[in-house]
Amino acid sequence: MTRNTVRYYLHNLDGLKQEIADINADLEQYRAMSSEGFYVNNDPDPYKDCPDPSIIAPKGKVKPFTNRVVNFNPGHYSDHSSVEALAVVRADFIRRLEQELFDKKSIMAAINCVLYYLEGYDRQIDKQIIQLRYKEHLPWKVVSHKMPYIDRSNILLHDKKMVDEIISNYNVRIRLN
């Protein structure tokens, strides 16, 4: 996590909340897909009455029988299963969505944790910086004019400290899981 990433999310807190809601909706949709929609033949030997493969398929370079999709080329059965491929793609997609959701929720929690502790008297400058820079989206020059009792370099230093707090809070959350 970089400082620029944190600043991006500070500027776009509503967008981050919307992304989390969208990912949750996508996950609900994919999890709701029934596993009964995948028909897989559980019979390990589809030809119990014919144990000799030469009766069904020509001799030579014949792939062993599998319980998957029929392949009409050299052998009778193929090693490829379209159902299995679809299930693996969906499972990978769900895993990626869950990881993205975890990352975004961790970022949101780290930001909210630091913003929550800005209520103290000694943190009023930080609270003003958050309000002016990240909620009202004012440039640094305007922020420094609205806070005349502190110079611009100190404002930037406070901002850097807040962003570093968010990054360290995020890193702690990532290590815990």
Image (cartoon, rainbow, N blue to C red):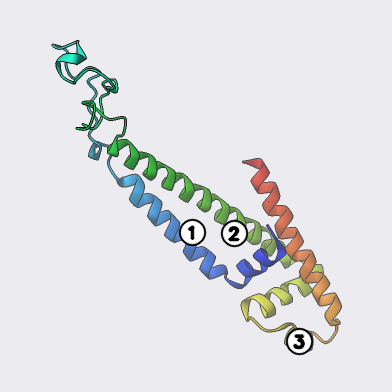
Compared with 105, 86 (above or below) is above
Which residue type does callout 3 highlight?
Lys
Q: Residue at x 29, y 23 (%)?
A: 63
Tags 2 and 1 touching, CB below 8 Å? yes
Which of the image's four quarters has the N terminus?
A: bottom right
* Rendered image quadrant of residue 143: bottom right
Q: Mark 2 — residue?
A: 108
Q: Are marks 2 and 3 in contact (CB under 8 Å)?
A: no
Q: CA distance from mark 1 to mark 3?
A: 33 Å
- Residue that badge 1 annotates: 20
**Label annotation for residue 50:** none
Residue 106 position in % (x across, y down)? 60, 53
Q: CA distance from mark 2 to mark 3?
A: 27 Å
**Residue to which mark 3 is pinned:** 141
Decide if residue 117 is on the left or right side of residue 37: right
Q: Amino acid at mark 1?
A: Ile
Element carrying mark 1: helix
Quarter of the image where one finds residue 79: top left
Residue at screen point 77% across, 70% down: 159
Mark 1 or mark 3, earlier in chain: 1
Q: Residue at x 72, y 62 (%)?
A: 117
Q: Amino acid at mark 2?
A: Met
The numbered mark, 2 or 1, whose residue comes first in the sequence reads 1
Residue at horizontal 35 percent and vertical 45 percent from the top? 31
